Amino acid sequence: MSTSRPKSPKTPSGRDEESFWAKIGTLGRNKRIKEVQGLQAEGKYAIDSPGSPTAPEIPPEDYTLHDNEERSIIQPKSLEDRKVVELIQVLIDWMNDELAHQRIIVKDINEDLYDGQVLQKLLEKLSGVKLDVPEVTQSEEGQRQKLTVVLRAVNRILGQNHRTIQKWSVDSIHSKNTVSILYLLVALARFYRAPIRLPENVSVSVVIVKKNATNQLIHRVDQENITSTYDDLGMRCERDAFDSLFDHAPKELQLVKKSLVLFVNKHLNKLNLEVSSQQMDNEDFKQFHDGVYLCLLMGLLEGFFVPLFDFYLTPQDTDQKVHNVSFAFDLMHDVGLPRPKARPEDIVNMDLKSTLRVLYNLFMNYKHLN
């Protein structure tokens, strides 16, 4: 399988030198011929040196770096790994299912996602929010501007500044970095509870090349873990009583929901708060998705005051809501309850089963309280 690095536009036969400079120009490099050739040779030596366990064939333009610039280059052989191939295909099928009504067909995650057009449509479909970007962008500058808006929205929705290290950027996506694109798609599939089964423990070998201050290229080979286990990704969990209720006993499910409402309101009423039973019947759970009631409820059930500076009483964005739910889960763990199997993002996304499981766990442990 060919390397996933981006190819520069080709020029007519007989203009090799111009084609080379077109490549350099596309990357924004203004280097003299000797300097570029020197960096190419040094980069080739760094990758192919005896101390390197692998020797990938990488286009020369990938070695043209600024001082202290670092670039990751996926090993072509990693793209042939069975699990990697399976992961890519699963993600492609998922995107095609999501975008079928728009007649968008994804065939290659690098070639079809790098300009931001498909990512925009995918995010709008998943989030239900229209992004303010031009529909069609032909220029590289326009593509980067669109990617900037799309990725800013992705990071805001995913809460990328909380306990995660950003694995993608405008540069990496636009340069068709397969690892960054996979990280991004897996994160979206995880957050939006995609009805897919991702292969577990998918990893790829990546060569990291960096040009230091003395104009030398240094390199290392890292293993990037794209997926972990299903439990970690939130893509699979053991079936329980709630699965059976949802599938086979809708009337009994309504009784369970009403019982949980009575339990929750019995304690929230102490603060003159109440959960609407109609809200529960509509399976909306908007009153739980921001985590505020969960934090207050834990304090009421355990008889302690939850400091208001520990959570957001009026959360304004997804990250603050995720913080609140995470904090409530921490409180449950601190008082000796098992940590919920649901992820905070599941509650924020108003996943009905996940919210019911959390509330039912509280009910079973505190139903004896007055």
Image: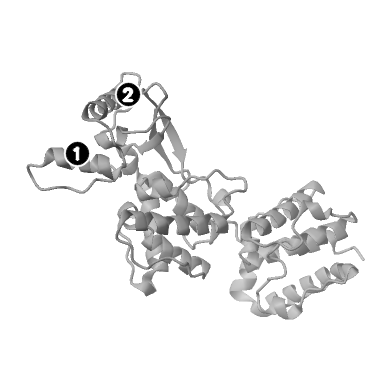
Per the model, the C-alpha gap separating discs 2 and 1 is 22 Å
* Quarter assignment of residue 345: bottom right
SS under mark 2:
helix
Identify which residue, 120 or 163, lies in the foreground. Answer: 120
SS under mark 1:
helix
Residue 120: percent from left, percent from top:
42, 63
Identified by mark 1, the residue type is Phe
Which residue is located at x 36 percent, y 23 percent? Answer: 215
- Colouring: one colour
Q: How many marks?
A: 2
Identify which residue, 323 or 1, lies in the foreground. Answer: 323
Indicate left or right for 284 with 104 as reference: right
Identify which residue, 138 or 181, lies in the foreground. Answer: 138
Q: Which residue is mark 2?
A: 46
Indicate left or right for 109 with 277 as reference: left
Q: Which residue is mark 1?
A: 20
Which residue is located at x 40 percent, y 51 percent? Answer: 87
| Image quarter in which the C terminus is found | bottom right
Indicate left or right for 43 with 205 as reference: left
